[in-house]
Image (spheres, rainbow, N blue to C red):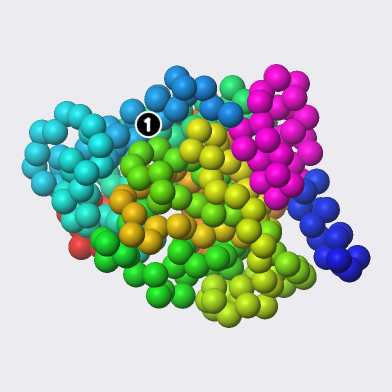
Amino acid sequence: MINVETNILNSRINKYKNIKINLNQKKINYKDFKFFIEIDLKKAELLKIRKLISIYILKNINIFFKKKFKKLKNLRSKESYLLKLPNITPNGVIKLKKETINEFKDIQMEVLKIFEKKNIKKNINLMEYAEIRLMRSNKHDYNSKRPYSSSKIHSDSWSGNPCDSKTAMFILGDRKNTIQFYSPKKIDSNFFKKKSNYETTIKKYGFKKLKKLNTKSITIFDQSCLHKTLNYNTGLRISLDFGIIISKNTNINKFTKRYKSNFFNPNKKNIHSIFSNKIKIKSIFSKSYQ
C-alpha cells in the first residue's frame, strides 16, 4: 500500500484512539477490527432498547391504522401494517412524526445512556439523531437497483453523509437480514466525497470481505469501512443506526441542508433541548414520508 493510502487509513483509525482508551478504563468488553469496533451490550441493555423501539413501532401502527395493539411479539405478526406505513423512506427509515415524538425521545435518551455507560459519550462531538430502520427484502418489493441502495457495497460518505462513522444495532426480526462489512482495496483523498452512485464507485476502489454484523453488540464503523445489507430472500429486520462525528473542528454550517439539522451535541448540559428543532415535524397523515 502506498504512503498516501497508509496515511489516510492511519488518520481514520487514530480517530478512535480515545474511545478505546475509555473503553479500557471502564473495562468494557469490545473487539477491535481496525475499521470498526464491536462493543458488547448487556442483555438488559439490549432488552431495554428493543422494548422502546417496539413501543415506537406500535405507536406508528396504532395511530395510522387506528388500532390498539399492545405488544409486538415478532415482526411477522404486524408485517402487513408495517409495510403499509406511509412514513418509511426507500432505504427503510421509519421517520419521526409529531404523533411519535415522545416515543422517539425515549429511544434517543436511551442511546445516550448506553454511550454514557460505555464511557464514550464524551468522545463524541456531534451525533446524528437515531434512525429506526425497517429493512425489507426482494420479497417485500425492496428496490435494490436505486443508485444509493443499501444492498450495494458502499460507504455512507458516498451518499453525502458528513459523519466520521456510523453506529448500528440489530433490534428485531430475521438475523439473516444483516450487514456485511468490507475493507476497500485502495483509498484516496476523494474517497469520502459524495458520489453519483455506488456501483461505479465500488468498481474504482474494490473491496475485501471482513465479517457480518454482531447482533449482540453495538458496532461503530468508520466511513472507510465499506458495507452492504444482505437482504435477498430474507424476512424483515428492524435495526437502529446513526452517524457520529469525533472531529472537534467540524463546522456544521458547511453541511448540506439535509444534514445541517440532523446532528446535535450529545454532551450538552440541557440535553432535552436537542429536541427543540423537532417541533415542526409533520403528521403521519401528511402526504410525504419526510
Residue 243, horizontal then vertical, whole percent: 56, 49
- Which residue appears at 71% of the width and 39% of the height? 32
Q: Crowdedness of circle 1 by 10 Å Cα count: few (<14), some, many (20+)?
A: many
Q: For the residue marked with disc 1, what is the amino acid?
A: Arg
Name which quarter of the figure residue 31 lies in.
top right
| Residue at 49% across, 38% down | 215
**Left or right: residue 28 compared with residue 147:** right
Q: Which residue is mark 1?
A: 50
Query: Can see residue 264?
Result: no
Give how far across and how far down residue 240 sits, in percent. Answer: 44, 43
Q: Give SS at disc 1.
A: helix
Above or below, 21 relative to 228: above
Q: Quadrant of the C terminus?
A: bottom left
Q: Who's the residue at 40% across and 38% down the image?
A: 171
What segment is highlighted magenta in the picture?
A: 15-39
Q: Residue furthest right?
A: 3
Left or right of residue 40, residue 52 in this image: left
